[in-house]
Image (cartoon, rainbow, N blue to C red):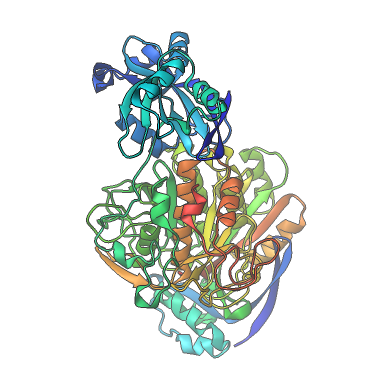
Amino acid sequence: MKYTFELRGKAVTLAAIDPVTAVRPTAELRSKALRAKLTNCFGAAAQDDSSGGPAGLVLPARNRKVFERAGWVFVEPLRPVAAAALTRGCLEGAEVVRRVYVGQGGTAIGTDRVAVQLEPDMSETEVKRRLKADRLKLVRRLGFAANTYEARVSDRRPELEVVKELQEKRGRYRFVEPVLIEVIGGRYTPSDPGFGNQWQHRNDGSNGGVVGADIKSELAWDLARGTEVRLAVIDNGIHVNHRDLRAGIVGGGYFVSDAAGGATFQGWQPGQAGFPVHWHGTFCLGMAGARMDNNRGGCGSAPEADLLAIACLTDQVGTQLTLARAIAYAADPTTEDAQATPAEGAHVIACSLGPADDDWVMTSVLELAIRTAALHGRAGLGIPIFWANSNAHCDIKHDEVCSHPDVIAVSRSNRNDLEDGAAYGAKLEFLAPGVDVYSTSSATGYRYRTGCSYAAPLAAGVAALVLARYPNWTRDQVRQRLRASCDKVGGVPYDAQGRHIEYGYGRINASNAVQ
Amino acid sequence: MNTIERTYRMRGTQVHLQEVVDLAAVRSASTGRPRVLTAAAVGAIAPEAESQVRAFESAGWEFVPRHQAADGAKVYLKSGGRVALGTNRLTVRVAGECSDKEAAELLACHGFAVVDRLKFAPNLFVVEVASGRDAIEAAERLAASGEVEFAEPELIEVIPRR
């Protein structure tokens, strides 16, 4: 059922999703030992339906965690639970049971409270009389404005019906608004000591930069940080024990090439030795997924994503078949590891390997691996695959990998929000910061480096943020969101489709992307 | 140094290569051959290829005169001065529905031994050509048979970081 009411003069619509109920169990039931009983008492845990599932619950993992920390669980309610939610009735084992609403701002939990403001010249007695007539009970006076109160709906009417009904009585109240419980996170700035060096996240104009020539990570992190999204970086080698990465790496593997043109796969788990190391892959992985708030370095664009480290062509020489196998493994680890499950595959893939120039002829087997991952990975939803363009000023059309329709080809922008002379063309997707960007490098350190190599994983991290918020979106939905949310930078004319030959759809904007 | 033109089909288009017939590439560890050509010497036939040859050398490959390494990898020059080394392997996707056994039998009929079945797509195999056969020619013949969706030689190339 949908309710439309006014907030500050604007119409707002919230949909009550009654197949889901918010329950705040008693402290005893919330204790770990009894958590298993929640299903029996209230119903099974409700699943996120961001992509239009049957219940309609929009609850990305990060927000669910915040609600859970506050004591709330979302369930597919048993019959008495659903009935209690509708009437805000009592229920054994629960402190409160409430309806759940979904609107443009995400998911909110209903309460029995409203905020009202009456004419300033009304006496307190008159106010109480009016509230009582409207079946509201005064809870407290809000001292920051005249005749403004928090009130409680004193009967069992649905709270938003009450709001709608009172708003329709024009002139009776200056405003009547529902009081809803929602996730209101603070604007987040990481505490990492090197965060100030990472203009890619927040460009404050230092070192000749332009204020705001960045991907707006902080605004995005208020809504998503990549939690429960698996992001794979494929590179020549990665310092998997880097102190800013190891906590995020959940697994991976590497391919050891032989002289005959073949390669042997070696699975790898955190803590094991032997993973090929190189600063390049370390830098790339850090751009996407270096950890946040660990008092080390900076952080990646998806600082809470689960990272998959995959190495191949460790000496930069090998076959496209090996690269194809690495991509296939990232998407579905069972292709190389009989003990793995498809669910352990990546949700987003980034690769920054390729010839220095524009000329790269792709084999059928590499195309097949890319297509299979892009179209059928992630249990059929498809995997966004990001690839670094050549750093040379050349047309991408001769690079058959980056110009492939299933590859999201990324070039680099600088701290002035300008393209930086890398590959361009009709197949360029967009730009991301990649000039003098700061990330993990070497076994323990950090550096500034330049290359499309670093723009691609940064953008892949933004895709992980989008998937954290909308986990059931298809690859195409994610791609379209990233395109549509780019900033049209560079002071150049974009065509009717919103593209420019050297800027693609513009410079990626994480904050816009996760809305 | 002498070169001959080689062609094969890849993803529906004709790929042109120059095979440097006087050269072979060998892994350093597998040879104690007396005369190793420098990158500069190889670059003399295609100056733009010199950096590519150096990348191969960094990865442990050496370039030697063909007569000193009859079993060495063939050396190809691609457009733009890119260098590729031949292998005796092809990637093959058998056309139509068939079991692994049927596919292996079909490929054996054409003189190939299955090295690996790739699991990310149906009917996809890595095969080895018999000793002495030219992999590019074998790929062309197999592709022309109509019994495969594609048959492409596996070439070793420089795929650097960007």
Horizontal placement of A305 versus A5: left or right?
A: left
Q: Is residue A310 visible?
A: no
Q: What x and y, as percent, mark residue A322?
A: 50, 57
**Point 41% across, 63% down: residue:** A236
Question: Image quadrant for the N terminus of chain A?
Answer: top right
Q: In the orientation shown, which residue stands out farthest toward the left?
A: A295
Is A436 above or below relative to A178? below
Q: Quadrant of residue A141?
A: top left
In the rendered image, residue A13, in percent from the top left (x then y), is placed at: 56, 33
Point out residue A411 in the picture as x, y percentages from the top left corner. 53, 68
Question: In x, y percent, where is residue A135?
Answer: 44, 16
Q: Is residue A504 left or right of residue A277?
A: right
| Labels in figure, total | 0
Q: Is residue A186 left or right of residue B8?
A: left
At x 61% / y 46%, what residue is drawn?
A375
For residue B79, what is the image quadrant?
bottom right
Asked which quadrant contains residue A401, the reply is: bottom right
Residue at 58% x, 87% y is B46
- Residue A358 visible in the picture: yes
Q: Nearer the viewer, residue B3 or A367?
A: A367
Q: Nearer the viewer, residue A201 or A399?
A: A201
Q: Is residue A58 above or below residue A400?
A: above
